[in-house]
Image (cartoon, rainbow, N blue to C red):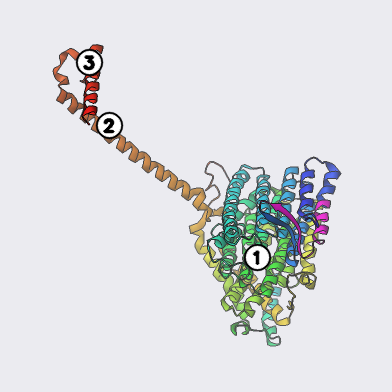
Amino acid sequence: MFEMLPPALILVAGALLIGPLRGHARNAVLLLAPALTLWAIWQVPDGVSATVPFLDYDLEIVEGSPVRRLFATIFALMAVVGGLFAFRTARWYELAAAYAYAAGAVGVCFAGDLITMFLFWEIMALFSTVVVWSGGTEASRRAGIRYVIMHLLGGVILKVGIEGVVVHTGSIDMQPMLATNFDTWMILIGILINAAAPPISAWLADSYPESSPTGSVFLSAFTTKTAVLALILLFPGEPVLIGVGLYMVMYGIIYALLENNIRRILAYSVVNQVGFMVCAVGIGTQMAINGAAAHAFAHIIYKALLFMSAGVVVYRTGMNKCTEVGGLFRTMPLTAICGIIGALAISGFPLTSGFTTKTMISQAAADDGLAMVYLLLAAASAGVFLHAGIKFPWFVFFQKDSGLRPKDAPWNMGAAMVIFSALCILIGVFPELLYRYLPYPVEYEAYTAGKVLFYLQLLLFSGLAFFLLLPLMRRTDTISLDTDWIWRVGLKRIGVLLYRGLAETGAAISAATEQTLAAIGREARNYLGAERRPVDGERGFFARSWPIGLTALWIAVLLSAYVFVYYLS
Amino acid sequence: MKKAPDSDHWLVRPVTIRRFWQVSAVVLLLTVLVQISIKVKGYFVVDGWFAFGALFGFLSCVAMVLVAKALGPLLKRPTTYYTPGDRDV
């Protein structure tokens, strides 16, 4: 039954030990638990290697395949480098929650059936909420509540779909499907909620920036990328995903352009980048799935790097907004350089990881003859350089001099950023290091002269557009309304309107009833002659006192009448 | 962390900025002109046209900035919009 233990259990054990341990022992666990998990991941063979009986089912809690190992690898790598970044400043419960969250992500990677997937899915939802709450502010508390409501709702929808599939097919296996009926649509929607797809995309930009500077690094990595893996495993080639992905790509760019909060810019760009992957899964060819998997791998590294760079700025300055910072390159050169490397990687600049992975997705669209998709992805690539590639480093590290002279990153944060910067360049220069682990054989050459030239033109001229249009992009100290307005304001307003309407209607009915009863009372008093009986004063007919004998007489009369009628019938 | 008066870092001196624009202009021009000798494969005809990448990248970004600018008045709100009791979010 058990050829091997789930690798996720090592991270669970690590998460449990973080609380009770102190000092070097805790630090050792923080580094060793994900490192051991990484080792265990590469011991998982292809196929099912561990099952557990549950009710009438055999849960396949460990199933290996190249794409599962690839995602699990980057999750474990993220945990170890994230742990290095966070261990000196994050509170123990944030670290423990982050490791349990990572364990959930690794568990999803190896889940061979829908029930196991759901179990680890919910573990992720619960512990990521704790990471959001670890921000320790009133804003993070509120954002965490909204976050957990959205994710539990997504979990319920996913569970409804899973139950439907199990009831109608009798199988709990994770196997490719298309959204063709209610059950599969529910599963797809449940997964897309975690991928931050529209219209429930606002949870991401709402919650991630409210977490701690270290928490947002962990949050950026796991939830959306496990959703991408789930889509790869369950919905490859689902056409609706192409449209959803393209919408996410454009939505992320427009909202990031409007945004002033440093980490919210990066949060919107997570949606933008996941849009590339969702679109690739929708295309569904081997090249596209390779592109989605490779881009998820590269994205986790450069996005975490960007959140680390932003996190150091927030940690050192206590400021979150573009309007508050600027000119920080003077005293934070390492953070600025690492941020720029991350920005170049997310933009898909040649010699960075983004170029070698994102262009695979565009190539897949081209190979499939999807002209509009290809051109929109090209436009989006230019837009990424605009909103993240230049905007983030420009407004944070350059533009005006804010006069702030904070220290550069502490050694552990600097080391984590250098490791991920090096990986961004390593994958960019030697893409075959990543390509060999992709789910399908790679027949793709990233660096051809024509392709490099096309993307250089695209990116450099988008940079020109940025600087020429800078006056139009003046930062304002504002937020942008998103679909979360519906549940944060709209539903509340509808509720208040309904309440007021009901209250006013109720008051009107009450007043009318009172008047009617008063009128009936007056009529009754007049009819029964209450006004003509001065002996009883102001009392009416039914309000008068009656002698007990008279009452007994009436009861006797009524009973006699009843008996009489009974005998007659 | 403390506030300091404006420094005269070499990166922000006017002469550096002027030189940055000059070098950028040359690089931009070169990336277009080099297409005379390097063929860009066009998958859908238009993307193989001379300087298509440059023009497409530039115009796409202009369009995105203008769309964002147009949506600004509709979507932008003060930071205290959701928490009127607080001074800031």
Q: Which residues are magenta?
A: A32-55
Question: Is there any visible trace of residue B83 in the rendered image?
Answer: yes
Residue displayed at 17% across by 28% down = A523
Total of numbered circles in the picture? 3
Can you give x and y, in whole percent of width and height, for residue A522 in the image?
Answer: 19, 27
The residue identified by callout 2 is A514
Q: Which residue matches tag 3? A: A553
- Marks 3, 2: nearer the viewer: 3
Q: Position of residue B75 (x, y in %)?
A: 51, 57
The amino acid at mark 1 is Gln
Disc 1/disc 2 C-alpha distance (Å): 66 Å
Left or right placement of residue A69 versus residue A542 in this view: right
Residue type marked 3: Leu
Above or below, A213 against A287 in this view is above
Query: Which residue is label 1 attached to?
Result: A175
Q: Is the residue under label 2 in contact with that under label 3 (CB below 8 Å)?
A: no
From the image, state whether disc 1 or disc 2 is nearer to you. Answer: 1
**Label 3 chain ID:** A
Protein chain holding label 1: A
Q: Kindly state the secondary structure of the residue where label 2 is placed.
A: helix
Marks 1/3 in contact by CB < 8 Å: the verdict is no
